[in-house]
Image (tube, grey):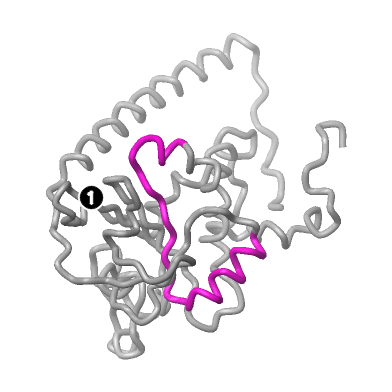
Amino acid sequence: MQNTPDARKIVSREEWLAARKALLAREKAETRLRDQVAAARAALPWVKVEKDYVFETPKGKKSLAELFGTRSQLVVYHFMLGPGWEAGCPGCSFLCDHLDGTLPHLNNHDVTLVAVSRAPLAEIERYKKRMGWKFPWVSSHGSDFNYDYHVSFTPEELASGAVFYNFTETPAENANDELPGLSCFYRDDAGDVFHTYSVYARGPEPLIGTYMILDLAPLGRNEEGTMNWMRRHDEYEDARSGNCCGSAAD
């Protein structure tokens, strides 16, 4: 944990209420702006996916269109787990801890959510079992999918000095062979698939419910660097001791 910040100013209830109402006005403005951004996102034009991608799944090879299942919308989380990695990215793992509970709601709303990594399926399944996750997770090993959606980079790209990430040329020194992102697709009645949206870097952060709760807590995120305090959920001391879900009286 980070150090507790200097003591805050202590005021009367009346002064607190005035400050809180001033903040409320900003929060309402943020909500309205978020709604406007969501509307603009929904109005983005689409791009037809022309390339055939094949994924390894627990039920055999599937195309991108087949990953939708019976639904018309697909959300792909690009999970940083490369071939041969001992474990998945801690930040991606932090985000994906929040996914399982969303699945019934998303599925009922015509949305399929799936994680995709470049690691072979056996390596994905091993790490998924360790983490205790249930969400669908497939392998793009051997395909161009991760490269085409700009979350994986070849040694040649990294050696060139810059890679295309988050819609801009990014210095290779700030990149790795795998980076995080999220992409969305739509499948029409004819079976054609369209790429509708992608977001990178901190863009998928709203999926991390823990951060949203910490933003409400008295000390906020209380971190010196983004996610510098965070560990995989089985690596915290309380998790190792079996005391990770204690009562409020602990």
Tag 1: Cα neighbours inside 10 Å, few (<14), some, or many (≥20)?
Answer: many
Quadrant where the image shows the C terminus: top right
* Residue 173 x/y as whole percent: 39, 80
**Nearest to the observer: residue 134 or residue 176:** 134
Q: Is residue 235 magenta?
A: no
Q: Is residue 110 above or below residue 167?
A: above
* Residue 14 x/y as whole percent: 59, 9
Residue at 29% over, 63% down:
64
Highlighted magenta segment, given as a residue range? 105-131
**Nearest to the observer: residue 59 or residue 130:** 59
Residue at 51% over, 19% down:
19
Residue at 29% over, 66% down:
63
Name the residue type under label 1.
Tyr
User: Along the horizontal axis of the image, is 146 left or right of 247?
Assistant: left
* Residue 66 x/y as whole percent: 31, 59
Q: Is residue 25 above or below residue 234?
A: above
**Nearest to the observer: residue 133 or residue 152:** 133
* Residue 24 x/y as whole percent: 44, 20
**Nearest to the observer: residue 2 or residue 192:** 192
Q: Secondary structure at mark 1?
A: strand
> In terms of image quadrants, where is residue 116?
bottom left
Q: Which residue is mark 1?
A: 186
Residue at 40% over, 35% down:
108
Extreme-top residue of the structure: 14
